[in-house]
Image (spheres, coloured by chain):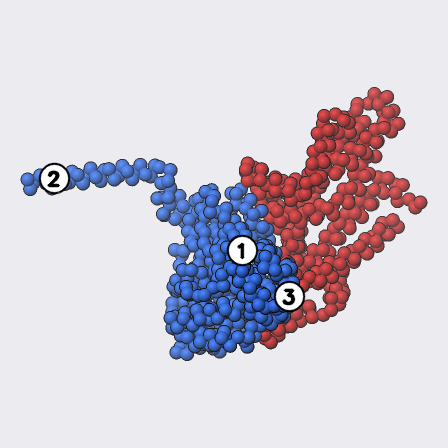
Chain colours: A blue, B red
Amino acid sequence: MNDLTPRRYDCRAGIRAMLVAVVALAMLALPGADRLRAAEPVRGGSFTILLSRDFEGFDAIKSPSLETQRYQILFAVHDLLFRYNATTGELTPRLATSAVPADDYRRWTVTLREGVRFSNGNELTSEAYVHHFARLLASPLAETFRTHLGLPLEKVTAISKYELSFEFSKPAVAFDSIMGQPVYVWYLNEPDFARQREREPEYGRLSAGAGPYMVKEWSLGNRVVLTKNPHYWNPDEQYADELVFRIVEGDERAAPWAALRAGELDVMFTHGDLVTWGRTQTEFNFVDTVRNFITLQINFNTAREPLNDLRVRRALVHALNRETIARIASRGGALVAHQPFRPGDRWYCPDLKLLQYDPQKARALLREYGKPLPRLDILATIGLNKNAAEVMQGMWREVGVEANIVQAVNPGAIVQALRRHEFFVQVGPSGVVTHPTTFLLNVQSQNPFNIWGLRSERVDRAIAALQSARSDNEIKQSYCELEQARLDEVPLAYLAYGAVGIFSKKNVGGIVVPTSINYDLHRIYRVK
Amino acid sequence: MRYALVRTLRLAAVFLLASLTSFLLLNLVPGSVIDALLGGGATELGQRAHDELARQMGLDRPILVRYVVWLGHFVTGDLGRSLVTAQPIAEALAQRLPATVELVLLAQVLALVIAVPLGVLSAYRQNGVLDRTVTTTTFALLSLPTFVTGTFLILVLAVLLRWLPATGFTPLSESILLNLKGYILPAAAIALSEAAVLIRVLRSDLISTLQEEYIALARAKGLPPLYIMFRHALRPSCLNLLTIVGLQLGNIVSAAIIVEQLFSIPGIGSLLIQSVRAKDEMMVQGIVAVTVIFCVCVNLLVDVLYSLIDPRVARPS
């Protein structure tokens, strides 16, 4: 008996192994088996990625445009100190290995990774950051760069060859997450390369970064071709031999869509127009997410009659059906928003008392206000923002408020109107929100960036509490109090989180759900 | 000679008027390139940055002074630099212009290649099946805007059949074949409506010429009909065609701006749209100036050719 049992067991195991092998072989022969084999990325090859706006340059001073599509190229040519996951708050070392704040958070010591080289072969040391930030902070655009950081950066000095000190005029609690934000303040060239060329007008067209790719060709208005940086510190991340960023401008549903369908692109990303189509089609792989960095919001000029009356502002928000706005403004791609951080984000406040859609309440508040309302101008740019403005116009008419849409053909006109407080209501994207301590502080009464003209002691108190908070728990608690104060005082209202979708051909892998405005498209590879 | 001189002076006035109008129009649009570049910034520092950039870019001076300064530089061949990218405008135009010129020329040639044979055949077989078909088709094409024709061509020939590229541009220096392949659809989108106009004009002129006595004489001599058509009837019927070709060139350039967007061709049309959006007035002025000079020169050439074909035109009355 004892002799037979193991033999019988061996026999069964053999049969089982054979069966498994047969099933595995059969599965590999089936049509869906490609996905099993696809786990292994194939290195090499060239990929064509869409940019729906022209690339304006590498240098933040020579071409300081607000255009964000250029980040896809900048991030491939440069690299960040850290990679930041905006949803989880996770920080992954890249060009730096550690960042330690001083007790008062006015100084951060950052240690650089040793052995990193720029594409011209020179080593990355503290000197590169010192030179880069000295140039930025001495430029007429210094304040713009501080705004991009969201922090009052004073200076950057070298402690040693690989250690840097970032100094701030106020506590910079959020600096670690800001270091991981792909804003173009962080993209720097090798210092010798920079010193030799940065006074030339064409400097914006040159680059020598420490990222995985380097520029091979830049044909204006046509394409930017990147090739592998032979000195990159982490060659495992360089899958493609060549990345071609092809510029196909215009409405996403026109030329870019045609180029995708005609097989001329490997990858294309969309910010709304094609998301709904992407969810239903089966021709391409589609990564779909809703992100808070392109949230649609309305701003009220609270210094101007009748918007200086809280009842009017609340009535106008109660009259808005966000479901409809989200559906129409982004053609079905967006999600309703009441606060800047979306559900699931670590800074999302779950217990806020919201101003929900309630036309009856809106009418009652307007009756209580008692005076006739003038026609309100809604300032908007063309495209999705104008769609939202048109929907809002209809909803306000329902509660007896007439509005005109003032269409701005360029973003400069919007900025000028906000800067000079020459607006009633403006609708547009909210921009990047990374950390609670870096963006909502502008509504403070004395803040020079207070475009809303709000004067609220409650908001000011909440901001002061947020500024003195240190731990994540303290920050979240005081931030949610500020959010509630903001909701109650209504200088602005969030309407819809923007949708982001990335199309790729079926044989393209490596596309991840984006957590910031950088989509990591340079990490794509071919799958068998 | 005097005729050409008078025409040149008139056209110089047209150039001045067009460039001044575009300069003023662009400055009437609210917002400035600096606002777009700097973003927010209601602070004192933000205002200082704004003023400093305005001074650097020369935007702190009155509009007319800026125009005169621009014109002064322009006549000496200095087009300045882009306010957004700092790229020399002459260089940007040199990079973009070939794509647009090629598109315009190909569209014009294609329009003539389509129009002349069809116009001749329609007139030759007046009221026949071919004439009726061509007439109906030309009416249909005349009623279609270029972007509709272009979109239709993209959908059928690029997206569905995948015979031709939907978008993109290959420089001539890289591959002549790929370059021409990329231009077939954009050139056709412009040429189809252009050809429709030319067919109508040529057909009616030819029909009128065919009533002339010398044509009857040629027929009586027993010359072959097609020989009569091409040898004796076509040349006198081409005067109006030539005028229309010159006049339509402005339309083709306008259509090229739309078609470049539609087919993503990096020409001056797409650059113009970008520059207007960004309020890059130096770039817009450079593009408008070059476009006006191009159209003006072509019209001058047409006028001169007109006088060569029919010397009575140049003669003082």
Which residue matches tag 2? A7
Mark 3 belongs to which subunit? Answer: A
The residue tagged 3 is: A372
Q: Earlier in the sequence, mark 2 or mark 3?
A: 2
Which label sits on residue B286? none
Furthest-right residue in this view? B317
Place of residue B197 in the rendered image (x, y in percent of width and height, measured from the top left): 74, 38
As helix, strand or loop, the secondary structure at mark 2 comes to helix
Image position, residue A446 (x, y; %): 55, 77
Amino acid type assigned to the residue bearing label 2 in the image = Arg
Q: What kind of element bears circle 3?
A: loop
Left or right relative to A500: residue B13: right
Q: What residue sits 79% from the left and 26% below the top?
A: B227
Mark 3 surroundings: few (<14), some (14-19) or many (≥20) residues within 10 A: few
Distance between the alpha carbons at the discs numbered 2 and 3: 95 Å
Which of discs 3 and 1 lies nearer the camera? The answer is 3
Q: Are marks 2 and 1 in contact (CB under 8 Å)?
A: no
* Chain to which mark 2 belongs: A
Q: In the figure, A16 relative to A521: above or below? A: above
Mark 2 or 3, closer to the camera? 3
Residue A71 in view (yes/no): no
Residue placed at 42% from the left, 53% from the top? A512
Residue placed under numbered mark 1 in the picture? A325
Chain identity of mark 1: A
Q: Amino acid at mark 1?
A: Ile
Is residue A472 left or right of A128 when viewed as pictured?
left
